[in-house]
Amino acid sequence: MLTQVIRTPHGRPSPSQQARDRIFFRNGAQAFQYTYHILPTLYGDSMLLYLHGPETETSDLRNLDMDTRTLACFTDALKRHSGMIYLTGLPGHGHTATCYAALQHVQTPDAKVIVLEHSVGPPVSGLTHVPLRSEIGQTYAAALREVLLHHPDVFALEEPPDRETASQALHASAAGRLALSTLYAADTVACISALLQMGLSSLLVSRTLTLVVAQYRLRRICTQCKTSTPPSDTVLKSFPSIETARIPSTWYFGAGCEQCGMTGFHDHVMVYEALPIDATLRQAILEENVGETLRRKAALTGCISLLDAGLEKVADGATTMDELLHTVPLTAVRGTG
Ligand SMILES: [Zn+2]
């Protein structure tokens, strides 16, 4: 049953608000929401819908299809009770669910956990949701200042829109608060580069950043019609940026059946890249040695790249090579940029 529709006060959403409008509905005890984006076209409006499942109410880090290393990195960073954790990747890959799961992981009856959001979805028990009041001219930085005046033990924010907001959040996390934020970039290294390009002090970033996690949601091959084929030499030569030895020798795909609506895919599989910031990476950030230098240092720390995590899913028959290369930005997959 449709229970609530939020639209902007002036009819058609403004460009900055279009992607944040949501439709909420319930199915029994479970709350769902659609996030929708409207694109005006020559012959009417085109609408893109994202369906968010009920996991936002009862999400758990252990239910997010994380590999063992990513889960361990995440829980370690959450134990520190201070510092900044960034969730990155491109929009639409489940960052909100991961953020809520992390907040619920640290939430206790004594902890004040505040989430600052452009618009609030189904409320999560134990969290204090604060919507941005852009309709009265409130900026994100001003809203975050108000949040911090309430001395949260843990706080979370969406995509800081400017240096002022990002800087406030980092300073607060340096002062003994745990902070989580999304920042959309191709991968973990690109996220750190983006922070520095935003004009933030490398000293502040290196002192406060504890973990960056990139995540992408790929379509899972339908188990009812899964079949396999070895890639031809011609196909292998079309991936000059990936060493042939790293490409799985058997590729799986869905031939199409009733269950998957002849698409070959059913459900999803996640790939993660977790980069905990150790002393070596901290020094590299301080010296602003980002890009390729930081990527090489990250690899030495045992960070499993999005490419390697994705190739493992391809080898396991969870998803296809095409799905990996079309979903994860090429700069991240190729390990360059
Ligand atoms: Zn199928």
Image (cartoon, rainbow, N blue to C red):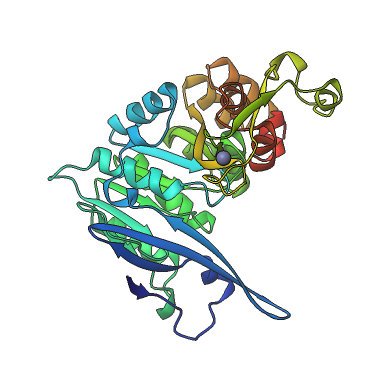
Q: Does residue 244 appear in the picture of this structure?
A: yes
Is residue 219 left or right of 140 when viewed as pictured? Answer: right
Residue beneath the point at 43% across and 67% down: 22
Q: Is residue 199 left or right of residue 107?
A: right
Q: Residue at x 46, y 79 (%)?
A: 8
In the image as oriented, which residue stretches furthest toward the left? Answer: 109
Q: Which of these two is toward me, 284 or 57?
A: 57
**What residue lies at 55% left-to-right and 46% top-to-bottom?**
258
Q: Reply above or below: 284 against 11.
A: above
Q: Quadrant of the C terminus?
A: top right
Give ligand 1's quarter of the image: top right
Give how far across and how far down residue 11 sits, in percent. Answer: 50, 85
Name the residue nearer the viewer: 71 or 24. Answer: 24
Work out which quarter of the rendered image holds the N terminus and state it: bottom left
Of residues 327 and 134, which is closer to you in this image?
327
Task: Give the residue displayed 38% in from the left and 27% down from the top.
Answer: 71
In the picture shown, does residue 42 fall above or below 178? below
Residue 300 x, y percent position in the rendering: 58, 15
Residue 144 visible within the image: no
Q: Is residue 322 above or below residue 197?
A: above
- Residue 150, position as x, y percentages in the image: 23, 58
Classify residue 283 by image quadrant: top right
Describe residue 47's horizontal placement relative to residue 94 as left or right.
Answer: right
Q: Nearer the viewer, residue 325 or 27?
A: 27
In which quadrant of the rendered view does residue 60 lie?
top left
Number of residue marks: 0
| Residue that protrudes farthest toward the bottom in the picture | 10
Q: Is 235 situated left or right of 44 in this image? A: right
Locate residue 33, reporting x and y percent.
39, 62
